[in-house]
Amino acid sequence: MGVTSTTTGSTGSLGLSVDRSSPVPLYYQLARQLESAIEHGALGPGSLLGNEIELAGRLGLSRPTVRQAIQSLVDKGLLVRRRGVGTQVVHSQVKRPLELSSLYDDLEAAGQQPTTKVLLSELRQASAEVAAALGIAEGAEVHLFERLRLTHGQPVAFLSNFVPAGLLDLDTERLESTGLYRMMRNAGITLHSAHQSVGARIATPEEADRLGEPEGAALLTMQRTAYDDTGRAVEYGTHIYRASRYSFDFQLLVRN
């Protein structure tokens, strides 16, 4: 067997194959299949890739081809070579479509086993920035909650959200068991549109510690104001994501 796993699956159950008639390089075909298995949880964090020679023999590939496929995933940060252990799955990078959906729902749909830790949940007066985003008076009462979102037990994002006071029942137990947008839908709120800005910066020492990254690591940032079908602003969020584990997917269309 080419791959054994301490957590989930092996390559023997993944149905790996290559198409020699395809113009796509063989190493790339194998790398994409392994990457997909990691992304969808078939090869979970901690899984060990075994003997390259056995994997090459089973697929009818040369050992350098298999080594190149594995190295490409090492370069992406999905695998790591550990002395005395072997090549091991580190984590999968979350690829999120850029649409009006919650991170929790996207992670759950991708088989990423999301969990949430609520770090703060309180009422406070809206700052000028928050008031402008939500279309309310400065100083009006809003509910702020800060959450750490994890997949397979590892931090992916730190989420800060503001919603108008009284909009939802936002107790800690509910916030840790599901996503915000699902809570809104269950409360009869119909999300319609959002304004969103995506950026990047380096992590502060506090952020790096919270997300399990080295100080100065790259972070993706997102600010979003979501509106319901009446045009009312129902949420303003400022989020940071580990760039090593998270990316946005865009679909670009030609404007006629």
Image: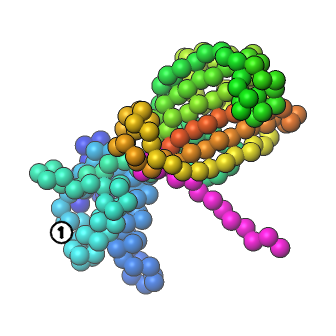
Residue for point 78% across, 23% down: 138
> What residue is disc 1 on?
53
What residue span does the magenta drawing correspond to? 242-256
Residue for point 75% across, 22% down: 164
Whole-percent x, y for residue 212 in the image: 37, 38
Asked which quadrant contains residue 30, the reply is bottom left
In the rendered view, tell whether residue 139 sits above or below residue 197.
above
Residue for point 70% across, 18% down: 125
In the rendered view, tell whether residue 247 sits above or below residue 185.
below
Whole-percent x, y for residue 251 in the image: 66, 62
Left or right? Give the position of 244 relative to 56.
Answer: right
In the rendered view, tell whether residue 174 sits above or below residue 99.
above
Asked which quadrant contains residue 162, the reply is top right
Q: Is residue 68 visible to the viewer in this orientation of the structure?
A: yes
Residue for point 57% across, 38% down: 239
User: Toward the viewer: 41 or 147?
Assistant: 147
Whole-percent x, y for residue 170 in the image: 64, 18
Secondary structure under the numbered disc 1 in the rendered image: helix
User: Toward the viewer: 10 or 245?
Assistant: 245
In the rendered view, tell whether residue 253 sits above or below residue 45.
below
Left or right? Give the position of 88 relative to 110.
Answer: left
Within 10 angstroms of label 1, few (less than 14), some, or many (20 or more) residues?
some
Whole-percent x, y for residue 71 in the image: 29, 66
Q: Is residue 1 visible to the viewer in this orientation of the structure?
A: no
